[in-house]
């Protein structure tokens, strides 16, 4: 630590011990920029938003085609797999990928599945996910997957083909221009951070660089480029190609020191503080988990997470309240219900999933401190007492340093906080109906899965009742990870994402949990996993209904029986379906069966590369833990 930083901390220590920083001194306005920050105090010069290109390392290549230039940039980013569906208008990219043996082109069954694979790859690796599709219907098919990634802040580059420029306006096959067909550039512009068409080879590098910076920026998201077929083949006379990873990655702003001081004072003096971790804290927790855990332990501050942040803080830690939000834990709900005077939000937008459908308990919180790299995410739901536009990691480390210098306000206060958390209990899951002979309770199924979670496992959870059951009943301890697509809440996401995740991290077990309705949407991607020997494990919750809709409507109108076949799926044989696509499939229809089966299934997936599918016949009558969501929908319908 530099002398200037130490002097500041010592001054704060002296002032704080004599007289806490008054709350009235905190900012109530919108976030401000340009203050002195911790890293400036340590290292002198402010860190630029983007790195100096020349300092990062580039080389010049003569007459490199546009398609080959893309591959060169992806290699520099250490991307080793691209996902897509081939077509005539992206033939130059397909041919370029064929030449580069270091990069696999994973051909999906459907462009939407390819985009979901790229999403899973990015989440599992932290690298850029790349999806390549042809013009027209190829691009429109990919839209949902690209939008899903973007709304979850997943870095993705989507490249779609387009007809040759000399055919524009002639109603060429799959024309995707403003003249004829569907204008896919404008379409993606509504679903991505940026979307552009490449007008010529010499403009391409500028547009590619902008797309890479946008996708890997702060906040991250999806970027789209539409490349006409003739331009993809054209040479760039002096192409500038990066030689190292990170040339297009943003460096986050660090937290201003006065904001850290104010946040620390609020947390230190609070009677019932809470720290809330969202998915925006994922990178920070990967780097600073030990520091963060030591800080909350020292000060006795309980930690809850959003659904997308589940497992960032070990759910086996004494101070963990689990998920706070829809389908969250009862301990987290009870702590919030009994009152919170200061809540520090790290990397969450506090949307409907995270806020339990914008529950009134949140609105009773006295002081909210919200930290996010994106200023527009701050204050969307709750009035924010202290907004901080900065890197979450810098806040974690800054608070920890202040904690070491100043310490807790008193031992008695810390003991009181610990006692409040230890008094909370998590009741056993309520099973509402008798056990059938031919099904398993979803609560029992989750308990059996929970027993086999391992440090090297990544879970990809689909949208539906499976979302609520896993969030409510699984306990995630890092380095195990769990991923949800809450932004767009796309059914069928996990069928592709689990494949992309396993391609990117073959060293980790990749397990999807999906409902039967969602599996029918994208389960055909099982043939992709089989063809490329991607050893995934998929657990299908099979109740022969669109269960979330079925239960939700039943809450709104009790005269509608759950047994009504209106939302039924036709009772397909999902085991035979999976086997026809090259998977090895199993059936679970009673308690204890998953517990006995899962270790062998995980072993086979790892050793053989053959995808494994477990079709678990669950009791459709069991009500998923979506009380607040169902109540909100019922209220809106009145």
Image: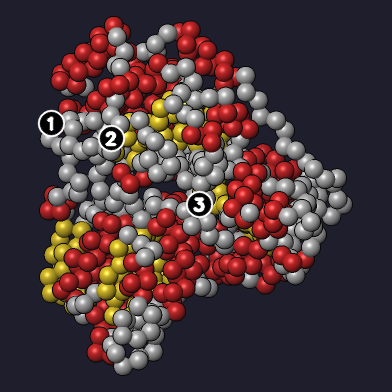
Residue 104: x percent and y percent? 41, 66
Quarter containing the C terminus: bottom right
Residue 552: x percent and y percent? 67, 54
Question: From the viewer's perspective, is the residue at label 3 or at label 2 nearer?
Answer: 2
- Indicate the quadrant where residue 91 lies: bottom left
Could you say whether the residue bearing mark 3 is in a helix, strand or loop? loop
- Residue 116's mark? none
Residue 119: x percent and y percent? 44, 58
Could you say whether the residue bearing mark 2 is in a helix, strand or loop? loop
The residue that mark 3 highlights is 486
Mark 3 closeness class: few <14, some 14–19, many ≥20 residues within 10 Å? many
Viewer-side residue, 553 vs 524: 553
Instruction: Say if mark 3 contacts mark 2, CB within 8 Å.
Output: no
Q: Is residue 320 above or below residue 447?
A: above
Q: Does residue 544 appear to the left or right of 515 in the view shown?
A: right
The residue drawn where x is 19% and y is 49% is: 50
Which one is earlier in the sequence, the residue at label 3 or at label 1?
A: 1
The residue that mark 2 highlights is 29
Mark 2 closeness class: few <14, some 14–19, many ≥20 residues within 10 Å? few
Instruction: Say if mark 3 contacts mark 1, CB within 8 Å.
Output: no
Quarter containing the N terminus: top left
- Indicate the quadrant where residue 531 lies: bottom right
Question: From the viewer's perspective, is the residue at label 1 or at label 2 nearer?
Answer: 2
Q: Is residue 502 visible?
A: no
Viewer-side residue, 273 vs 427: 273
- Distance from label 3 to label 2 (Cα)? 29 Å
- Residue 44's mark? 1
Mark 1 closeness class: few <14, some 14–19, many ≥20 residues within 10 Å? few
Question: From the viewer's perspective, is the residue at label 3 or at label 1 nearer?
Answer: 3
Instruction: Say if mark 1 contacts mark 2, CB within 8 Å.
Output: no
Q: Is residue 33 above or below residue 87?
A: above
The residue drawn where x is 61% and y is 43% is: 628
């Amino acid at each position: 630590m530099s002398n200037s930083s130490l002097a500041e901390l010592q001054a704060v220590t002296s002032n704080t011990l004599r007289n806490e920083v008054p709350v009235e001194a905190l900012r109530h306005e919108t976030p401000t920029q340009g203050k002195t920050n911790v890293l400036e105090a340590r290292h002198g010069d402010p860190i630029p938003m983007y790195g100096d290109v020349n300092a990062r390392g580039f080389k010049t290549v003569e007459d490199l085609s546009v398609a080959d230039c893309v591959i060169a940039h992806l290699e520099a980013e250490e991307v080793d797999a691209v996902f897509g569906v081939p077509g005539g208008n992206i033939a130059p990219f397909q041919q370029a990928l064929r030449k580069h043996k270091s990069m696999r082109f994973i051909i999906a069954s459907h462009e939407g599945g390819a985009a979901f694979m790229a999403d899973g790859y990015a989440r599992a690796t932290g690298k850029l996910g790349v999806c390549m599709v042809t013009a027209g219907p190829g691009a429109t098919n990919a839209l949902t997957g690209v939008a899903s990634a973007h709304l979850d802040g997943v870095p993705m580059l989507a490249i779609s083909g387009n007809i040759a420029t000399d055919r524009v306006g002639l109603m060429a096959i799959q024309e995707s221009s403003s003249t004829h067909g569907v204008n896919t550039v404008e379409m993606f512009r509504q679903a991505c951070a940026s979307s552009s068409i490449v007008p010529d080879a010499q403009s391409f590098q500028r547009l590619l660089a902008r797309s890479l910076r946008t996708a890997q920026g702060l906040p991250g998201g999806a970027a789209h480029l539409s490349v006409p077929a003739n331009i993809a083949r054209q040479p760039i006379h002096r192409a500038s190609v990066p030689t190292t990873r990170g040339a297009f990655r943003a460096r986050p702003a660090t937290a201003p020191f006065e904001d850290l001081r104010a946040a620390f004072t609020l947390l230190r003096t609070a009677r019932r503080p809470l720290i809330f971790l969202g998915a925006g804290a994922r990178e920070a927790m990967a780097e600073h988990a030990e520091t963060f855990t030591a800080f909350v332990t020292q000060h006795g501050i309980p930690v809850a997470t959003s659904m997308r942040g589940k497992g960032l803080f070990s759910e086996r830690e004494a101070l963990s309240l689990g998920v706070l939000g829809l389908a969250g834990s009862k301990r987290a709900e009870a702590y919030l219900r009994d009152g919170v005077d200061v809540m520090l939000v790290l990397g969450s937008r506090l949307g409907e999933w995270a806020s339990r459908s914008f529950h009134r308990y949140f609105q009773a919180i006295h002081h909210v401190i919200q930290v996010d790299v994106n200023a527009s995410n701050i204050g969307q739901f709750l009035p924010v007492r202290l907004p901080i536009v900065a890197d979450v990691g810098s806040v974690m480390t800054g608070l920890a340093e202040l904690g070491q210098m100043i310490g807790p306000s008193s031992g008695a206060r810390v003991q009181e906080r610990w006692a409040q958390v230890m008094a909370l209990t998590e009741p056993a899951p309520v099973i509402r109906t008798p056990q059938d002979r031919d099904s398993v309770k979803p609560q029992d199924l989750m308990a059996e899965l929970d027993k086999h979670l391992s440090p090297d496992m990544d879970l990809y959870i689909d949208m539906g009742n499976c979302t609520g059951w896993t969030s409510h009943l699984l306990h995630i301890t890092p380095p195990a990870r769990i991923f949800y697509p809450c932004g767009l809440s796309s059914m069928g996401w996990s069928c592709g994402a689990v494949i992309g995740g396993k391609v990117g991290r073959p060293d980790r077990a990749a397990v999807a949990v999906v409902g039967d309705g969602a599996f029918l949407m994208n389960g055909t991607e099982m043939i992709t996993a089989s063809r490329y020997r991607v050893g995934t494990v998929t657990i299908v919750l099979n109740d022969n209904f669109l269960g979330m809709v079925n239960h939700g409507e039943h809450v709104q109108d009790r005269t509608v029986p759950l047994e009504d076949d209106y939302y039924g799926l036709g009772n397909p044989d999902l085991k035979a379906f999976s086997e026809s696509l090259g998977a090895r499939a199993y059936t679970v229809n009673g308690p204890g069966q998953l517990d006995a089966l899962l270790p062998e299934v995980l072993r086979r997936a790892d050793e053989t590369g053959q995808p494994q599918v477990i079709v678990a016949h669950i009791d459709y009558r069991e009500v998923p833990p979506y009380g607040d969501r169902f109540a909100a929908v019922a209220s809106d319908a009145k």
